[in-house]
Amino acid sequence: MADWKTRTKLIHEGVRRSQYGEMSEAIFLTQGFVYDSAEQAEARFVEAGADEFIYARYGNPTVRMFEERIAAIEGAEDAFATASGMAAVNAALTSMLKAGDHVVAARALFGSCLYVLDILGRFGVEVTLVDGTDLAAWRAAVRPGTRAVFFETVSNPTLEVIDIAAVAEIAHAAGALVIVDNVFATPVYSRAVAQGADVVVYSATKHIDGGGRCLGGVICGSRDHVRKVVEPYLKHTGAAMSPFNAWVMLKGMETLDLRVRAQAATAQRLAEALDGHPKLARVLFPGLPGHPQHDLAMRQMGAGGTVISVEVAGGQRAAFALLNALRIVKISNNLGDSKTIATHPATTTHQRLPEDQKRVLGITPGLIRLSVGLEDADDLLADLSQALEVI
Ligand SMILES: Cc1ncc(COP(=O)(O)O)c(C=O)c1O
């Protein structure tokens, strides 16, 4: 319902009740659906109605509930769920591109997103990488024949904030579609569609699940684009979200707003406390006034988000010493979880990148990414402070 507020939509939007009137969303753990007649089967394959399903690779009632709920939150007309965030990134790009097309992307991307761009190159799509924070670079790179621009609205792990509205203006003038990976902004702080994004992609594995249980992803966009471009690609290539995972994501969404706002408040507090610490060379957090895109972050998202990156003075040895001294904060590589997680991008999530590329992106040996969870902020600060003492 268009006039419901976010928290109401996160709980009630998209619900489909069976004849039993169940309160909690049902898990329709079925790959297939029974037809009353051969004629009905035939008709459904020609065109399935809103409550008609064919095969879980094409759609499933539990998955559909998740798609409708996230589309409503995002302010998008429709959505298609995928098996993981990377399946969503891959499908968002591949479903609309062909050999000879040109894509402009920000170079500060998650390692697997860069890998997807490499694959596109193998199939004759030309990819130009730019400094996503430099609007002149976008302007110079976009040309007739540019079909899409792609960027993480807040980059992983150096937390560069890209100006969605400004890049969208440049892209749209050239006739290109704006595809954004909005994981770090989260659906709670997202205004991506209103700011000009045509396609918004999430790894649902992160804040949407929020408990580190399931993989999932989703592509949001106009009904035409989702149904005519994204759906045919995904339903024939098979990266469907499992109904069980969709159910976990639906339940995760009920608390998404509360969780993300609490995580962002704690992240703000930790970033302010850590900023200027003598053992840290840099504290990167869009919520800090010193962040290069602080004003943009406030305009675009209204908050700094739930992830902080810090650079330990003393390189990898010092970073590892800090990680190994943490007690509450866990060493892992997910984000958006209720548990606070510390990641060393240079040796894990971004290990594959050549050293010179890591240097350009600021993925230094001392960089640690902190995904702030739901623990008590005082406990987290005490844990980080004692670990910083060790190095
Ligand atoms: C920005 C970004 N995009 C996409 C993904 C991929 O998501 P998934 O692990 O669900 O495939 C991640 C995962 O870390 C990410 O950080």
Image: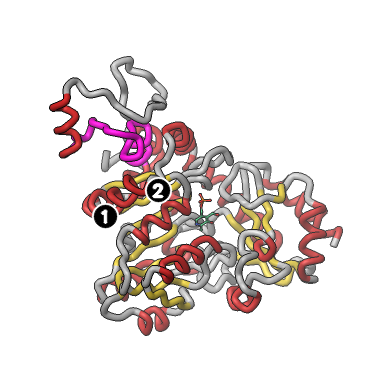
Q: Residue at x 35, y 41 (%)?
A: 67
Which callout, 1 or 2, points at the residue further toward the start of the chain? Answer: 2
**Label pair 1/2, CB-CB below 8 angstroms:** no
Q: Quadrant of the N terminus?
A: top left
Q: Is mark 1 within 8 Å of ligand 1?
A: no
Q: Which residue is drawn at 56% across and 51% down?
A: 264
Q: Residue at x 75, y 66 (%)?
A: 277
**12 above or below 156?**
above
Q: What residue type is labelled 1?
A: Val
| Residue 76 in sight from this viewpoint | no
Badge 2: few (under 14), some or many (20 or more) residues near its Cα, within 10 Å? many
Q: Which of 131 and 260 is in front in this view?
A: 131
Task: Report x, y in % for residue 249.
Answer: 46, 37
Task: Answer with left or right where residue 40 lies relative to residue 334.
Answer: left
Q: Quadrant of residue 110?
A: bottom right
Q: Quadrant of residue 144?
A: bottom left
Secondary structure found at label 1: helix
